[in-house]
Structures are given as structure tokens and as C-alpha cells.
Amino acid sequence: MSGAQIRVLVVDDEPLGRRRILDLLSHEDGVEVVGEAATGSEAVEAIRRLHPHLVFLDVQMPGMTGLDVVRTIGVDAMPATIFVTAYDQHALQAFNLAALDYLVKPFDDERFEQAFARARRLVSLEETQRLHERLMAVLQPGQSLAPDSHTTPSPFADRIAVESRGKVTFVPVVEIDYVAASGAYAELVAGNRRHLIRESMQSLEDRLDPAHFMRIHRSAIVQRDRVATLLKAAGGDYEVQLKDGTRLRVARSRREDVERWLGAV
């Protein structure tokens, strides 16, 4: 997102809380505060109308809480979100609802800068992914016009964009052993390398070719070529063991599908 401004929405029922964040944002380059909201319902309306890249969202608000706002908008449709809370016990639930980070009141300038720097990198990465997808959408139809082309381009991803040390790099899909849910993130495991990305498991499942990848559990997607053994426990629980020895649980509701996919029935 180089050269563009990050559109920010600040949500807090306390004016002093909003003012604190607005003051800190005023010292950051490339920021456009597109609005403020004092209630959950105002936040929902502002998110839908203003399309911010980043939301600072108070958790404890009367009526509709910050967590309710995320549930109303939908996790996949929610912009990058930094929760602001006075109680640390909300952190786990916040991350499960796709929070980028959270700030515990009262937070200092350094902690704010850490959270905002993380958000800036994420917004830049997501913008890069969108541009890449648009480019692929433009290029793919033309590929079939090439004289030596006789195949239709695959609708599935052949690589996944990840952020690594401030750079956007690309992990070839063929190198991915499995994907594991990690709170608001997904972890791509490729050999001894692990890459954390802010993308839902459902989104990744949709992007990966089902001929080669299967979601065997709500928290795991595996590449079929990496599976060495299907383990069946006496209690009816299944696991797959990969060639490197990693074991991944199979959801009971997916056991028959996994058996057919692996050719075990």
C-alpha cells in the first residue's frame, strides 16, 4: 500500500478513549481517520458505509459490544481490527474473532506503535494480495488465446502471499504440507518453514485445489501427497500421519470423506 493512506475508524463509547487513539494516530504518517463511533450500532453502520482498512474497536460498550460488532459484520468481511479493552480476559475471545491485535487500557505509546505497525504491514499485504488477484483475473483469460495453449487456467491458487520480515513473499502451493488454524490466523507449514497469515481457514479451503488439499478438521487442511498413514483408534477417532511424522486429527464428521479422498475405501 505504498503511497496510499490507511483509512482508520475509531470506536469507543468514552470520548477520552477515542481522543487518546486519535492523538496517537496524528503522529503516524499515511493515516486518514475516516470516522468515529461511540456505540456498536454506529460502528456497524460506519464500517459498512466508510469501508475502513483498520478499526480500533472498544470491547466493553453498552448494548452492542465490540465482539458483537464483529459477529454482525462477519469475521471474513471485517476490516483489520485492533481491539481495545480494559480486561485482559477478553483477549482470547477477541483473537478467535479475527482480531489483529489488542490493547489493554491504559496502554503506553510504545505498545500502540507496535500494534499499529503490525496493522500497517497487514493492510499493505492484503492490498498486495488484492492487486495480485486482479492481475491474475486479467491475465488468465488471455492465456487461452496463446497458440500453444490447450488448457483452461486453474481457478485455484498456485501460490500464497505471505509477509516475511517486512517483505511480501510467495509460498508455492505444492510446497505446503498442511495448514493449521492459529487464532485469527492460519499457519502454512512447508517443510521446516512456517508462515503465519491473516486469512480464514474457509478462505484458504476455497483457494486450494480439492483434488490435492482437504480440510480434515475445522483447524487443519492437509495436502494428500504428504499423508503416509490413516490411523484409526479403538474409540473411533481418526488421525492422519504425514511423511514427516506429524499427526493431525480428523473430525468425526469428515472421517468417511477422508477415507474416500485417500482411497482407503
Image: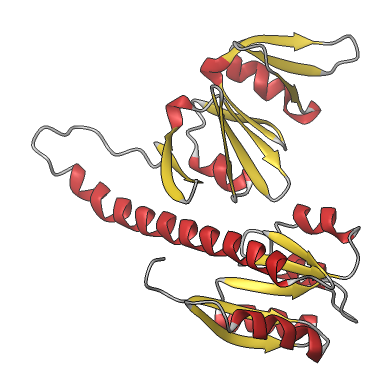
Q: Quadrant of residue 154?
A: top left
Viewer-closest of 152 and 57: 57
- Report the residue at 52% width, 59% height from top: 121
The quarter of the image holding the C terminus is: top right
Which residue is at the far left?
147
Viewer-closest of 261 and 99: 99
Q: Quadrant of residue 150?
A: top left
- Report the residue at 41% width, 57% height from top: 128
- Report the residue at 83% width, 87% height from top: 14
> Residue 122: percent from the left, percent from the top?
54, 58
Q: Is residue 40 above or below residue 110?
A: below
Residue 157 in sight: no
> Residue 98: percent from the left, percent from the top?
70, 56
> Residue 1: percent from the left, percent from the top?
41, 66
Which residue is at the far bottom?
15
- Report the residue at 80% width, 26% height from top: 252
Q: Is residue 91 above or below residue 185?
A: below
